[in-house]
Image: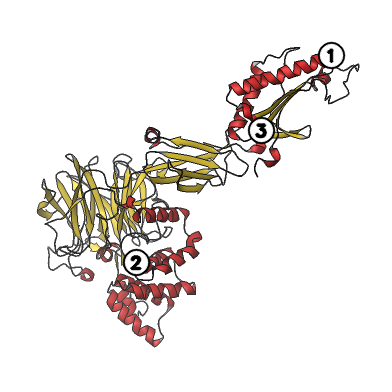
Amino acid sequence: MVPIKKIGSVLFMFMLGMVFCVAQTKKSKGDLFFFQYEYQKAVNAYEEQLANGTLTPKQFLNLADAYFQTNNFEKASEAYLDLYKRDTLMDGHHYNKMLQSFSKTTDKERKTAFLATMSNDFPKELMENMDFNNQMLQSESANTGLDYEIFNLEGNSPQTDFAPAFYKGMLLFSSGRQQNKKVKYDPGNEGYFNLYGSTLQPDGQITAIQPFEQVASSNFHKATPFYSNKLNSVFYVLSNTQNGEMTFDDNGKNALSIGMQTIGGAFQLLLKDLSTSFYYPFYDDASGKLYFAADFEDGYGGTDIYFVYTTNGQVMSAPINLGPRINSPGNEIAPYIFEDSFYFASDVFYGLGGMDIYKANIEKDGFGIPINLGNGINTEFDDFGFVIRNEGEGLLGYFASNRTGGKGKDDIYGFKVDEKPGLKTITFKGKVVKPYGRGEAVAKAVVRLKDANGQLLSETYSDEEGNYRMEIPWTNTLVLESTADRYSTFKKRFAEEDLQGLAGSDAYNIELSLYDDLVEEKEGQKVVKLEKFYFANSAIQLTPEIDAQLDKVVSFIKAFPSAQLRIETYTDSRGGSSTNFTLTQGRSDAIKRYLVSKGVPATSILYSIGYGEDKILNNCTNGVFCIETLHKQNQRSLVVVLNDNVLFD
């Protein structure tokens, strides 16, 4: 398992389970302090071992983590960097801590240098998320213009208060405030976490705070509640127990499980693993999915966000990871859905502080880029546990933070705002395909979004299956462009009403034509690929069958507008030479008129020539008897691409 991670401030040492060191092997003082969350004491003990030359590589990693947990980021960054150079023990989660440490010191250049060397080892989604958020946080777009009214709750205690949740006319939350002085959780020097209920006031403050009696009592942890109106049930995490006593795995660890308490009804244990803790349950009434955070071995870093399918809360599937668009090498916790937006907290290295709150648009096949909510909600400290709902003409929400000026270790803050938090974006996604045949995918096509003045806003390339995706801050006018080597160029302008109609759509496919699919070699020259067609005897009138073939020329010119054409028409040797010249010239001119009527610029057709019987392809010359099939071989029309050799220079 990946070592224990920081989640929130004091929150992590309570909510990541309790490890009790078993005396099967002798532990150093540093190990004992480290696994009991006494990080400063662990630092002192490990440093003494380091001076004596008895510190193992694993203990040195613990020392780096202890530096990080005690906010000694200078020493943490140096220790992580030393381990990285040795190419030992470090994983993605520790890379995230190292990058966070660089961000919190004056040595930010090292972060840039490290990312340059490691970017190919990170998921592309992570790098896209980072680039997008860096641009937003460094630009005027980071200021959403929302006027937050943020207030500290008067009911906060000197201990840890966090995980607010709406419950009818009340606000539920978790707290380490000590109700029973005989029952104390030593690592936090406060009570075991318990659930509390409070009455919501019109101004967003809370009163009448009491332990929440709708769930069964316990001497151990109960925390992070979420109330499902559809199921009339509260989901929450609780310490694993049996017969009123804690239960431990073979390594002496007590983890947290997820339970569901129906109000006025039965309790059901939903997710339990003696070696893995589950955090922050969120039940989506619309889909029946139960979301939560956990640190499984197959995750992307620390705690990742997962979901399981349920039937009325009963778990019906294995946990499903939300993937690298949401999860990172850091910790992701506290999922919450509001009006097709997915909110959660993450301590990924490119944020403003420790834990930041992000919002991602919910799409049919996944999620949009998680966007940092920016200054106001987020700070350089830990901000997490975001909930929000419509209230009157605006919105009311809550979150937890250990920012300065609070009453305790983590405080709950309320906020009022007129509009939904989070930057409004527009997403273009879909496939780049060929418009003919079976719509074969086009790989490695460049796709660009530009503003009305031609300024590049975003650029990407389609993958091997032709998939592309781009997300940018909302704008009222956009130009979408795409091309690939020896392919046509796609260009389309989108006005505001077009973009409004596009928002929330499943996909926008881009069609690119491959030049080599549309032309072929004939008679020593490149011609537009057409099925052979015939005019009626002695006629120059086009038929529907001929029109259908000429429409391919129209499509070719739309795809490759710089192509220059020559129309050539030939006949067989039957009839007089003069008559045949006149006939083929009339047919070439008829072809030109049709193409121009369909939008082909007349300037693209440099020549329209009838060659009569000048170029007979077989032995069916004047006076030679041939069957009809052989004569028809000489009746043909060609659309020649004159500038084929320079078209892609």
Looking at the rendered image, the quarter that the C terminus falls into is top right
Per the image, label 3 sits on a secondary structure element best described as: loop
Residue highlighted by disc 2? 4
Q: Residue at x 20, y 68 (%)?
A: 185
Q: Is residue 514 left or right of residue 125?
A: right
Q: Residue at x 13, y 68 (%)?
A: 182
Looking at the rendered image, the quarter that the N terminus falls into is bottom left
Going from the N terminus, do you reach mark 1 or mark 3 first? 3
Residue 195 in the image: state x and y as whole percent.
18, 55
Q: Is residue 635 left or right of residue 450?
A: right
Per the image, label 1 sits on a secondary structure element best described as: loop
Q: Which mark is residue 576?
A: 1
Per the image, label 2 sits on a secondary structure element best described as: loop
Residue 46 in the image: state x and y as whole percent.
35, 80
Q: Residues within 10 Å of mark 2 (few under 14, many from 20)?
A: some
* Circle 3: residue type: Gln
Going from the N terminus, do you reach mark 2 or mark 3 first? 2
User: CB of mark 2 within 8 Å of CB of mark 1?
Assistant: no
Residue 310 in the image: state x and y as whole percent.
34, 43
Q: Residues within 10 Å of mark 1 (few under 14, many from 20)?
A: few
Residue highlighted by disc 3? 564
* Circle 2: residue type: Ile
* Circle 1: residue type: Gly
How far is disc 2 from disc 1 in space, using C-alphas? 95 Å
Foreground pick, 221 / 638: 638
The answer to whether residue 227 of the structure is visible from this angle is no
